[in-house]
Structures are given as structure tokens and as C-alpha cells.
Amino acid sequence: MPADPSRRSFLIATAALAAASGPLAEGTARAAARTPKVLVIGLDGALLGRIRDADAPNLDSLMASGLTSASSLYSNPLAPTLSGPGWSTIITGVWPDKHLVKDNAFTGNAFARYPDFLTRIETAKPALSTYAVASWVPVTTTVFSSKVDTRVSTPSAEYDTGTTSRAVAELRGGNRDAVFVHLDNIDHVGHSDGAASSQYLAAIHDADAQVGQIVAAVRARPTYASEDWLIMITTDHGHTDAGGHGGSSAPERETFLIATGGGITAGSIRHDIKMPDVAVSALAHLGIPVDPSWNLDGRPLQQPAPDAFDTLRTRLVTRVDEIGIGASVLGFTHTPPTGWSVDNGAMGTGGVEEWRGWSFTTDDFWTASERGQGRENNIRARNVFAVADGDEWVDQSYSGTFDSTLVTPSWPVEGGSTAVLRYTTYYRQEALQKGEVLVAYDGGTPVPVKTYTADASSRAESITLQVPAGATTARIRFRYTGGNNWFWTVDAVSLTAS
């Protein structure tokens, strides 16, 4: 009897997973014997780079004992880089195209459909105790719902000092299971003095001392030894050097996550974490499964899911023709992952080297090529992703048209069954541009299964394929044709049995 290839693949994958995550699994098992608890601290308007510049020993210690991940926001027209959309994204676990918060007025929000993570905790496990305290009133009056056990808006006269003292009292003497704390003064100073100022560094130093008090309160709990605290520190947006935010510049879009506890490897750096992951990671740590019907965008930081493109991060190189990108920024390669290929047989010549045919890049690098044209809203791609960008390619002397095809490895399928093709994508259309997804079985003629000829906002696609009888392999192609038009991104491509 011939070997079952699907069973063999399953066994290989299972063995690889066990080998790769054995120590983490052991740590998680040990932590499972303790009571899981979550603390999220929000530092409004804080820049990770300026935290590293500041005298911030407590935040430095948390980075050393856990993970650090820089991330980037969206921009208009999805939403401006303001606190309303930012905190809504962090607290609900979905991007602005779902929670619908576009400003600090919260008009038209979809919190009934996408509630805050403390409300989800209360719904799933009402016996757990939840607490939120904030220096910015809308966080606790609008974003967090009345289902949260306790919501406290600190009086303006007390500001972050009052927020800190309330959080310390609850964490030291209470028995909360999930706590959210919002500190505001870094943002306040960013507006008044700018992120490049000494005053901004001083505000970070003060906030760092408050974070130290809050974390010390956790560790001083009489039951701390029997508890497993996941502590996450994050922010809603960044600031310009001169002060202010709301636009699409890199400093305004800058966010981050610092996390420790819950089996996280000390001193680790991650490139795949996004803002919605905070809420989902809190749920996962408390043992609350994410229902697919919730339609959340976040994924648990405890369960990284790197794809083939992410393996290219160490191969990324600096700019060639894109002189507007920092000379030291590593951010693109034309070398595909193992098993993948790029067919440029019909591709024009010349043009900007970085974008000649399908390229593999990062948000920091790609968005810096030309800001304010929507590239910032490629929100559902993570880490390294593939892009075909005709608009940038033609910014230098060229001939012909943009015609490039990204080709997957040959993946096993079962003839006569169905398979599901999944990927995240973002497509901006102009004129005669076209994006095609094609599938070829056993080396046969590629057949279109999806065509893009109109704008498609960042989304997760799922296409069910009817595998012909007798077919054993399938190869997917992503073909982009155009000229001085727009772009198409693809990430997290997979083909699985349905």
C-alpha cells in the first residue's frame, strides 16, 4: 500500500513544530499550573526610539526580560493617526475598517459588533475580574463597555499620578484578572514640546517610573508566586519631532509592543506583531478561545505563524534607486523564498531597481518610497511581504510594461477533492492594470481563479478550488500587469485541504 502523503506531511510538520517550540511548550505547561492574569499599560504617544534614548530603566528591564516589537499604523483615508482610532484598534483587536472609529469623537463606532477585550473576557468568563483606569476619559467611558467590572476615569487634577496610584492599589491589594492602565502625559508633552525635545525624554522618564510602580505592585502581590502575569506595554501612535500626529509620516505611524511573562523568551525581537494582537494575546493568555465568527484581526503573540516570505528578512538589502529611503534601511530583495520563483520573462526593462517585477519588502521600506498614496494601509500584511508596484517602478527611465508573475512551490493536492487557497492582499487599481490569481495542476495550463480590476482594500482572501480528478500537485501564480499605475501586495499564502 503506498504511503499517504498527507499523513506524512502532517507527521513531518508535527515533528518540526515539536522540535522548534519544545522549550516554549514546556514553559507554557509550567505556567499553566499558575493562575493566568493580564496587565496592559498604554503609554499614549510614546516613540520606541525615544524610549531607548531616555533614562527609562523599568522599560529597559521589561524589554530585556521579554520581547520588543516595533510596528506601524495605517493612515488616511482608512483613519488618521489619532488616539481614538489607535486605542480602539488596540483594545478591540480589529483595524479601523471594522471598528469604524475615524477620530476622537468615536462617531459611528462599531463597538457593539467589535467590543473591547475586557468585555469579551466578561462574556466568556464572567467570574473573572476586570478593571480599567485611564487618564484620557474616552478610553474608559467609550471604548471599554459597561460590562467591565470597574472603569475609572482619573480626574484631570490628578492626571497620570492619580491613574498610577489607583492601578497600584488595585494590583497590590485586589484580585483582578485583567487590568488596563492608560497614561497620557508623554502625548501631552509631545504636543507641547515635540518628540525631539528634552521635555519629551523627561516625560518618558516620568512614565517609566510610573510603569515601575505598577509592575512592582504586581510583583509585591502575596499570591504572585502562584500567578502567571502577561504584561504588555504599548502605544496608540507616535509624534513628529516638532510635535503632533495624525498624518502619514513614519514617526506618526510608529507603535510598539513590549511584553513579558507568559513564557515569552527574554530579550527577543519580533517583526510580525501588529496592534490588534494585544487584545487577542490577552484573551489567549486567559484561556479564552477566539471564535472565528468574531472576525478579529489580531493573533496571539504566543502563537507566531511565520510564512515563507518572512524567511527573507536576513536577505533584505538597502536601497539602490530609492534615494528618499534612508541609506541604512534594510528593506527589499528580489530573491524569492526556497521553492518560489518570479517570472519576469515579459517584464519591461529599466525603471526603479527596487520594484522591477515582484519584490519582497517591509512596511518601513515600501511606505518610505512614496508616502500618502495609500501604501500605509497594507495593514493585514506582516513582516516581509510580496509587492508589485508599477507606480514606483516607472519613476526612472524604463521601456515596456510591468508584467511579472509570482509563482508558489508545487504543493500536494488530492484529486477530486477541494482545497482552499488563502492569502492576505491589498490592491489599488488604475486604468489598464490587472491582477490575476491562477492555478495550474500537475504542470498544466494556468487557469484564472480570481481577477482584480478594481480597488480591493487590505483583506484576507479565501478561494475554494475544485481539484481535478487524478491531480496530485498545484502551483499558484500571481500575475500583475500594468504600467504607470498602482500596486498589489500579497502575503501569508497557503493551500490546504478544505
Image (cartoon, grey):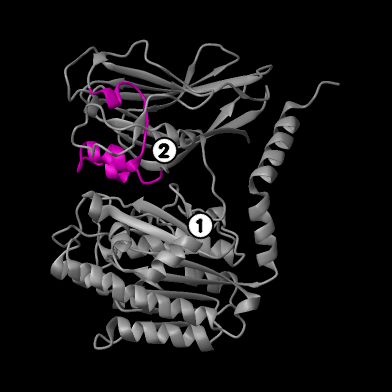
Q: Is residue 114 visible?
A: no
- Percent x, y for residue 330? 33, 37
Report the disc number at residue 294. Answer: 1
Element carrying mark 2: loop
Question: Mark 2 or 1, which is nearer the eye?
Answer: 2
Please report the residue visible at 49 percent of the width from the left and 27 percent of the height from the top: 337
Please report the residue visible at 37 percent of the width from the left and 53 percent of the height from the top: 70
**Which amino acid is tagged 2?**
Val
**What segment carries the magenta color?**
352-380
**Which amino acid is tagged 1?**
Trp
| 246 lies left or right of 267 | left
- Percent x, y for residue 391? 22, 28
Image quadrant where one finds the N terminus:
top right
**Separation (CA) of disc 2 from disc 1:** 26 Å
Element carrying mark 1: helix
Q: Nearer the viewer, residue 297 or 43?
A: 43
Please report the residue visible at 29 percent of the width from the left and 65 percent of the height from the top: 54
Q: Nearer the viewer, residue 245 or 16?
A: 16
- Percent x, y for residue 481? 31, 20
Please report the residue visible at 56 percent of the width from the left and 28 percent of the height from the top: 465
Which is more N-terminal, label 1 or label 2? 1
Q: Badge 2 is on which residue?
A: 384
Q: Is residue 421 above or below residue 444?
A: below
Q: Is residue 336 above or below residue 227?
A: above
Residue 376 belongs to the span the image colors magenta: yes
- Percent x, y for residue 202? 24, 72
Crowding near the residue tagged with mark 2, few <14, some 14–19, many ≥20 C-alpha atoms within 10 Å: many
